[in-house]
Image: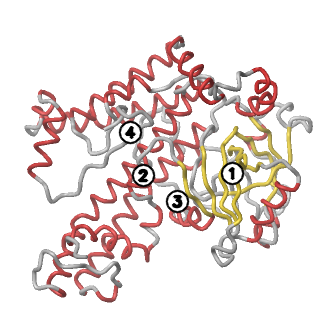
Amino acid sequence: MNRHPMMALHHLSLLLCASSSIASAFVGPSSINSARLTTSSSWKEHNSINKIGRSINCPQLHMVEDEDENNPLARGINSVGWLPSVFDASPSRSVFDSSMSSDDDDEETTETLPLFPLGGVVYTPNSEHILNIFEPRYRQMYNDILMNGSKRFVVSMSHPNEEGRFAQVGVLFSLEELKEVSEMTADQVKYICNHRVTGRVKLHKVLNPEAWESRDTYLKVKGTIIDDTGLLDEEKNDNDSDEAMDESIPQSMVAELKKAAAFDAMEKSPEEEALLQSFSDLVELQHDLTEDVRFTRASVKSFGVAAGTEIDPNLWTSIRLWQSYAEQRLVARQNEMQKEFQEKLVEFLKEEMGDGDEELELPSAIGFQDLSPELQNELAELQKRMTSELKPLLLEQTLSMQKILEANDHDDRVELMRYFVDAERKRLQAKKTLKSMFGGGALADEDSETIVEKKEAAKRDEPKQQIFFDEGEDAFQ
């Protein structure tokens, strides 16, 4: 079947860029079109993301001005806490650990837990994720947690620069479903596992650091579990609540109704109200500027700021939503940078294969050596520009999420979220000011939907805008 050249172009350019590990660090737009992310992950995939950061020597983050004393990421990579490297012969007690009270490090409150480092990825409580397990050491880990009945382990982000060093706050993955797929995959993948993040974990120490280099088994850590979502308590009380429930009413429905009622009745603190106002102002700016990646105005009403998970939506759902928004912005910027090269690639293929035939069927892949010398040079330059511009943005997004994850309490998370929302709002406000100075001020006086229609009518051949969706049907455009 014939395809228009532009239809296959995106896939071609990604295949070409894959040789430099740039494209492998970003998820395609169709993979992150929902705030409720179910991430198909593997160690190999996340390790490719981690490789991006290893060449970064603490770059200048672009979020705010250098003079901002309140910037939570002012120290770059060192703005978040890290365990000592596993290659340290005698790792000392970390600064993070030393600042904790003696109760936090008490034997009665700490546990020995398996550690599964996952590249430059930050997960948040009360989310669901899928992992594909193929490495022998992690096959062993799953066998062990099934045999001992714990069915849980720690996931922590890897340091972007230093091999064998991990974030000091991770999350607790609880195994919900496991499928044995070794026969279907010729033993390339052993398990496909579904997990739920049921809490955070403060890591104190890696107990067997030598295993990282030998790879003969998985790492184990001493850590303190923080159940600030209430999910672990819910698991303990499930049996009691089951007996008291009317069997004719689904428990999930009752739980959702209770959360919705709590959301309607919730009284917000001044700090939570300020966060909501900042988010509302940001959404209006996005529509004034007709940003390619933007929230709908309806999303303001469903933006959660409550603590825990008893109320839905809550702050954790909004944090995940913000994380998805940052990922979409990265994808949109990557696509924008690739656009000019894509157009030249199409022209090259049309000249080489079809003498200008608009309905030419393009190949699904093309090798770098098959390009003209001019296109090879342009591709190399594109890769350099993408590396220099996108890596700091990726690192900034990751550190922002990690900073929120390691916050001490709900109030600190609200403050951090407000800072990051305000930083984005200031960026767009500056953009709007510049636009109005050069004759773009009329945008604010015209309905945003009409503007989008005019823009699409004038540029039918351009890629469609990136659309960002929430769980509600009318929450996002």
The mark nearer the N terminus, 3 or 2, is: 3
Determine which residue is flagged by label 3: 57
Q: Residue furthest front?
A: 248
Q: Amino acid at mark 4?
A: Glu
Q: Kindly identify the amino acid type of the residue bearing the numbered disc 2.
A: Leu
Q: What amino acid is found at the position of numbered circle 1 in the picture? A: Val
N-terminal of the pair, mark 1 or mark 4, is: 4
In the rendered view, tell whether residue 38 sits above or below residue 294. below
Q: Which of the marked residues, 3 or 4, is nearer the chain's N terminus?
A: 3
Q: Write the residue at 66% across / 78% down.
A: 186
**Dot placed on the residue nearer the N-terminal end, 3 or 1:** 3
254 is higher (above) or lower (below) than 453: above
Q: Is residue 183 above or below residue 392?
A: below
| Residue 395 point in image, percent of width and height | 49, 52
Quick one: label 1 or label 2, which is nearer the N terminus? 1
Crowd around label 2: few <14 · some 14–19 · many ≥20 (10 Å): many
Q: Which residue is mark 2?
A: 393
Residue 228 lies left or right of residue 437; in this view the side is right
What residue is pinned by disc 4? 65
> Relative to 253, does residue 29 appear above or below in the rendering?
below
Residue of label 1: 155
Q: Are marks 3 and 1 in contact (CB under 8 Å)?
A: no
Foreground pick, 5 / 80: 5
Q: Mark 1: give few (<14), some (14-19) or many (20+) Cα within 10 Å.
A: many
Is disc 3 in contact with disc 2, using a CB cutoff of under 8 Å? Answer: no
Q: Are marks 1 and 4 in contact (CB under 8 Å)?
A: no
Instruction: Work out whether mark 2 precedes mark 4 in sequence or the reverse, and give the earlier one.
Output: 4
